[in-house]
Image (spheres, rainbow, N blue to C red):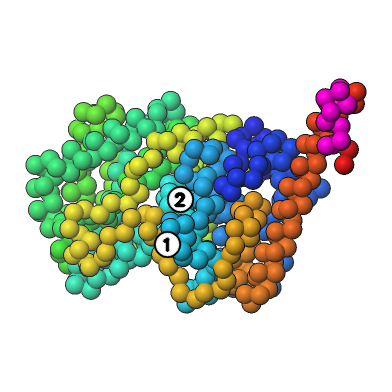
């Protein structure tokens, strides 16, 4: 990551001064071998089927670090897992590591940022929770004998469009469409009782930002004929084209702006295939580009930046973070969650749900070393594979590693200060003794 030199320096949450350039440089060099290959998370672990999961986790922590550097310390991602949670600060709860029933380790008592759009670590936790809710709703819907359709809304866009402006126009056009008399009529004909909507965006070299909505439409009916679906698709497309134009988005051509499916061309259930793809992203992580093209998802931008710094991609990620701030990732139409008996959780709550099996507590110093060296994922790997004692021993080795980096930087700063002053000046100033000892 030495290519991200110009980026904002990390601010240490525990107020140890890590802000000097020398310290930052040493911090970076400590992560890297002689060839500039990252040494972080290369802890040797025994082979196991869980290795893929821990590899993805390790990548997510690495990507979070990139996001933190790009978005700077004013962004909430910057403090993710660096400060003790409210429970630790005010209610006397402990901070440490715990595991769930499936032996997956988690940190507890470390405040997560809960930013589903910008934080790759929180996003996976929140998305997995959200996905399970959708799966649950669909299962109980189909157990009632009913079907669901997969709808996609897109807009026309070009390279120079602002993402934020397009998102706002997109949202306004869609909500006007949904509340229009014509759409309500279509809903009635379809016997559509609700929808779940997920907002996504990709960026491509040729056409810029591509925001799109994937939606699951819940119909209280048992069958849908292809010809009926095509008819509804064309009706909704006409409406969508009208509202896009009204909101200055340009009229989408037929077959582009709106797509409605029950089954895919290969015969698979369209909603099911989408949920599988979504699950695949969570299990296997984010690839560098989309479909091998020069097109990125926000997290694949981070992936690309972790390999090679590119100011354009970095600026795009900042634009994305700004444009998505405060927007919901997943929206359920009113009443749909309660229909399937799903509780409402906020994003932050989902990323902080308590785990069951206690592993160990962490003191301030230990928590600081993990954060300072960004070794979250290797600590969790240890907790999953070895005893609590061995895990603590590993964490203590991090403590001495981070201390020696801090000490080295302290000395380096002191030496550069000394060399900048002439000895005689120092003697005159009476500060020589402070530096000679
Ligand atoms: Zn986070």
Instruction: State the image quarter where residue 437 is shown.
Output: top right
| Residue drawn 61% across the image and 34% down it | 7
List x then y, in percent, for residue 17.
65, 42
Q: Image height check: is 395 above or below 406?
A: below
Instruction: State the residue position of label 1.
Output: 91
List x then y, in percent, for residue 22.
74, 37
Asked if residue 327 lies left or right of residue 22, the reply is: left
Judging depth in this view, the residue of 389 and 175 nearest the camera is 389
List x then y, in percent, for residue 18.
66, 42
What are the residue bounds of the magenta stretch? 425-435
Q: Is residue 30 magenta?
A: no
Judging depth in this view, the residue of 207 and 310 nearest the camera is 310
Name the chief secondary structure element in magenta: helix
- Single out the mark in the foreground, 2 or 1: 1
Judging depth in this view, the residue of 41 and 242 nearest the camera is 41
Q: Earlier in the sequence, mark 2 or mark 1?
A: 1
Instruction: State the residue position of label 2.
Output: 113
For disc 2, does the CB lie below 8 Å from ligand 1?
yes
Whether residue 254 is visible to the viewer of this picture, yes or no, is no
């Amino acid at each position: 990551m030495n290519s991200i030199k110009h980026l904002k320096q990390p601010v240490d949450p525990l107020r140890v001064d890590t802000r000097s350039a020398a310290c930052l440089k040493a911090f970076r060099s400590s992560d890297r071998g002689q060839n500039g290959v990252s040494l972080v998370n290369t802890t040797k672990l025994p082979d196991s089927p869980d290795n893929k999961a821990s590899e993805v986790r390790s990548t997510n922590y690495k990507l979070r670090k990139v996001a933190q550097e790009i978005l700077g310390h004013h962004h909430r991602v910057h403090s993710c897992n660096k400060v003790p949670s409210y429970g630790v600060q005010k209610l006397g709860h402990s901070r440490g590591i715990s595991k769930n029933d499936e032996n997956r380790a988690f940190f507890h008592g470390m405040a997560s940022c809960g930013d589903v759009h910008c934080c790759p670590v929180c996003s996976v936790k929140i998305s997995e929770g959200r996905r399970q809710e959708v799966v649950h709703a669909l299962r109980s819907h189909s157990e009632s004998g009913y079907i669901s359709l997969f709808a996609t809304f897109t807009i026309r866009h070009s390279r120079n469009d602002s993402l934020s402006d397009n998102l706002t126009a997109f949202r306004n056009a869609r909500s006007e469409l949904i509340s229009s008399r014509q759409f309500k009529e279509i809903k009635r004909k379809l016997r559509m009782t609700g929808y779940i909507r997920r907002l996504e965006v990709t960026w491509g070299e040729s056409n810029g930002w591509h925001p799109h909505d994937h939606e699951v439409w819940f119909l209280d009916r048992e069958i849908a004929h292809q010809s009926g679906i095509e008819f509804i698709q064309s009706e909704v497309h006409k409406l969508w084209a009208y509202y896009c134009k009204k909101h200055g988005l340009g009229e989408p051509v037929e077959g582009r702006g709106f797509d409605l499916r029950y089954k895919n061309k290969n015969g698979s259930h369209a909603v099911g295939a989408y949920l599988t793809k979504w699950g695949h992203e969570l299990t296997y992580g984010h690839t560098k580009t989309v479909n091998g093209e020069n097109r990125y998802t926000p997290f694949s931008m981070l992936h690309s930046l972790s390999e090679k710094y590119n100011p354009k991609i970095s600026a795009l990620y900042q634009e994305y973070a700004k444009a998505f701030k405060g927007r919901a990732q997943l929206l359920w139409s009113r009443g749909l969650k309660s229909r399937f008996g799903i509780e409402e959780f906020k994003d932050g709550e989902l990323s902080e749900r308590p785990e069951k099996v206690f592993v160990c507590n962490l003191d301030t110093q230990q928590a600081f070393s993990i954060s300072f060296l960004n070794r979250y994922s290797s600590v969790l790997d240890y907790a999953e594979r070895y005893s609590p004692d061995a895990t603590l021993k590993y964490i203590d080795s991090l403590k001495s590693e981070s201390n020696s980096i801090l000490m080295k930087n302290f000395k380096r700063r002191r030496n550069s200060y000394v060399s900048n002053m002439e000895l005689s000046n120092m003697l005159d100033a009476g500060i020589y003794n402070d530096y000679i000892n």
